[in-house]
Amino acid sequence: MNAPAAGLPVPQARRILSIWLPAMAMDRWRQGASERRELDDKPLVLIADTAHGPRIEAANRAGAAAGARAGMMLADARTLCPEIMTAPSDPAGDLSFLEKLAVWAQRWGPWSAMDAPDGLLVDVTAVPHLFGGEERLVADVVEAFAGRELAVRCAIAPTAGAAWALSHYAVSGTIVDPPSEGEDLERALQNLPVAALRLDQDVVTVLRRLGLKKLGELTTIGRDAIQRRFRNRKSPAANPLVRLDQLLGRVPEPLLPVVPQQMPLVQRRLMEPIRHRQLLDQVVEDLAEDMARELEGRGEGARRLELGLWRVDGEVTVRRLELAAATREAAHIVRLFATKLDDIDAGFGIEMLRLRASWAEPLALEQDDIEAAAENHGIALSALVDRLTVRLGEGAVSRPVPFASHIPERAQRWQPPLEPEPASQGQLAFHKRPLKLLERSEKIAVLYATPDGYPQRFRWRGEVHEVSRVEGPERIAPEWWRERGTTRLRDYYRIEDQRGRRYWIYRLGIVGDGRGGAPEWYLQGLCA
Amino acid sequence: MTQTDLSSLPTTAFEDVATLSARRSARWRPGLAALQGKALHSEVFTSSREAAGAGAALALALDDWRSVPRGEGQEAEDRRSVLWVQTREAARLGGRPYRAGLPADLQARVIHVLAEKAEDALFALEEGLRCRELAFVIGEIAGNPKTLDFTASRRLTLTAQKHGVPLFLLRVDAARDLSSARMRWEVTSTPSAAPEWNAQAPGDPSWEAELFRARTHAPGGWVLGEKDGCLTARKAREETDKAVANWTAGLQHSRMPRRA
């Protein structure tokens, strides 16, 4: 924490609420079905499959009493308690459950962060008076989690690290007052074990072998001694000093808040399944209008839309649409979907349609055209790009942008048309470039070359050209930082033939460069 | 071949002046768009062995674009894009536009569309003509596809007229088929003028352009070039000039009986 600048009001100390759900996986499994509650007094473990056989991820109270521990192999637990029951664990489900809990926990503070795998951090700075003080707040947390049948331990402290340490290793509901000076916090934490620093297991083992078992003991042997021992400064979990500083608020620790995001979604359930295109178009139109209203209310425009069609026989068809610019124009959306719905097989009928904007961007509200001028003045560029992309496919519409390279075909890239142009260095206009570049350089057969080195007569696509005027060579060396060492250099010539046709040709390599045989000639560009 | 020179027929002095003014107005010249408005639908016939067609079409389009004065409620600076539609065949034959070689005004504006078939290219052209945020549309279609018939070109003309977006359709290696294009050019390269500092080098591009069919102009041939960012045209041949004189004189003579 930086010292507050003079003149500014002293910011209120942070208050972080750490919530730990020690048995979250088990509690969640238990709530999955009503008959699972009857197994409470029988030993039961959740297992995950590993390369060495099933391993225990969590155990219930009876299981723990029988000797099963998280991290133990199931075979070992079976020797202790043969009648142990198993169920598969679900780490992905646990994580999404925790994410939902994090959003739910925002009832106690403006923002919350996940502390995977089984904890939450809530910022309750300046909030407790709404609950009648921090003690009442903690009581409320305990009560709310008890209502959801989740075991919980929580603590409030000025830093996230301290709150985490207290919730895991102190009595539940511990509250550490904001430090008048740093010593308060240090004294409150000095009896916690070193594992409370959120360290990797091997670091904890090293500290234990050194005889440092409590946080208070870490300061007894001197900071530089620990610094010499633990030199990894990149991972805080491997460096006790960094963790200690975070714990005491000496260095900041950024947290990633969970921000709930809702996708605009509209749907229609149909009383009578539809089997005809005309009706389908009507429903899609209604959906698009609903979606436009939904988006307008949020001040957003859709960039990606997904239309799901649920058929009576259980088939689901999804059509997705990407838009070049954010839009909430119902007519435009309907028009773009119309071409995508041509090959829909309705089967026995479609009974539900759902339109979802899985990617939306802010789009300011603006006034409509008063005179409905769109019909007369044509369509907007973004609408044009959408229509072309839908009909011609991804990548058909693009814009050439410069790229930092000397090789002509690499100096131009294609990107989606409405994206901002990447920053690039201005090109020196010493050399003229052709108006058009062939997709691939075409080999030309030189029939007669002048002693100067450029061709006097060559054949390209079956026709002989007599060169009348030449400018060159412009030598372009291979880009050694991108290409193999055997790539040959190019000598470019701008030429004009007897009938005034202008080309851009190059010779690949020079005689005796040791990178292949006799150099060959290529035609790469057509000049205007 | 004996040619009856209609312009040498005796006419009254009044008729002479009328013929002269008609002759002057009937000739195409660079910068004409300032008086008559943009040429909305042009076709440029060219060979796939050279980029003369594309270069001349861009020059003509830019000439129109620069000569038309900015209208009342329009932005002072035109920041609209340019749509360049190519069929895959045309791109294979003549290459794709290369940003560094484009006219400086257009480098950041080109939006390129690659269409698999001629139908798709026609769709893209028509949609492009409907777009109010495009300065002009360039199409490149190779050969004489069946879908590009008179009806299709009529559709393009009407769309271009309705929305006022000019279309320049490059017909690569195509025969002169039926079309409703307002101006039809045939463009080939011609030896360029020697640059001042290096006479051995190719100079600024110049093209021999033949306007072989036009709705409001007499046909004719010019050598087009670009100088200081402006389109220049000098007469290609004297006989075309004479043909023009005949054409306008014929126009006057055919009117005379009606007036009498």
Image (tube, coloured by chain):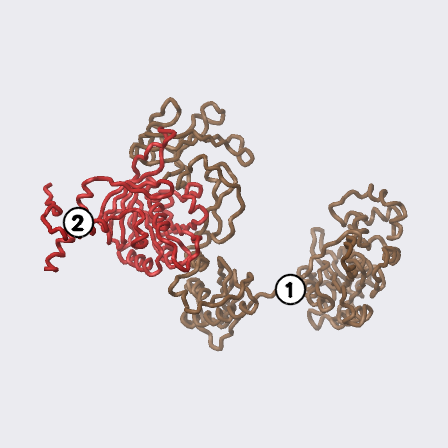
| Tag 2 residue | B247
Q: Is residue A352 left or right of residue A391?
A: right
Name the amino acid, label 1: Pro
Residue nearest the viewer, comparing B102 with A75? B102
Q: Residues within 10 Å of mark 2 (few under 14, many from 20)?
A: some
Residue nearest the viewer, comparing A372 with A141? A372
Residue nearest the viewer, comparing B162 with B225? B225
Q: Is residue A14 left or right of residue B135?
A: right
Quadrant, the C terminus of chain A? top left
Judge whether A440 appears above or below A112 on screen.
Answer: above
Q: Secondary structure at mark 1?
A: loop
Q: Position of residue A178 (x, y in %)?
A: 83, 61
Q: Colour of chain A?
A: brown
Q: Colour of chain B?
A: red
Q: Position of residue A505 (x, y in %)?
A: 39, 33
Spatial separation of the CA atoms under disc 1 and disc 2: 76 Å
| Tag 1 residue | A260
Identify the chain of the residue marked 2, using the numbered disc in the image.
B
Do the dots labelled 1 and 2 sit on one chain? no
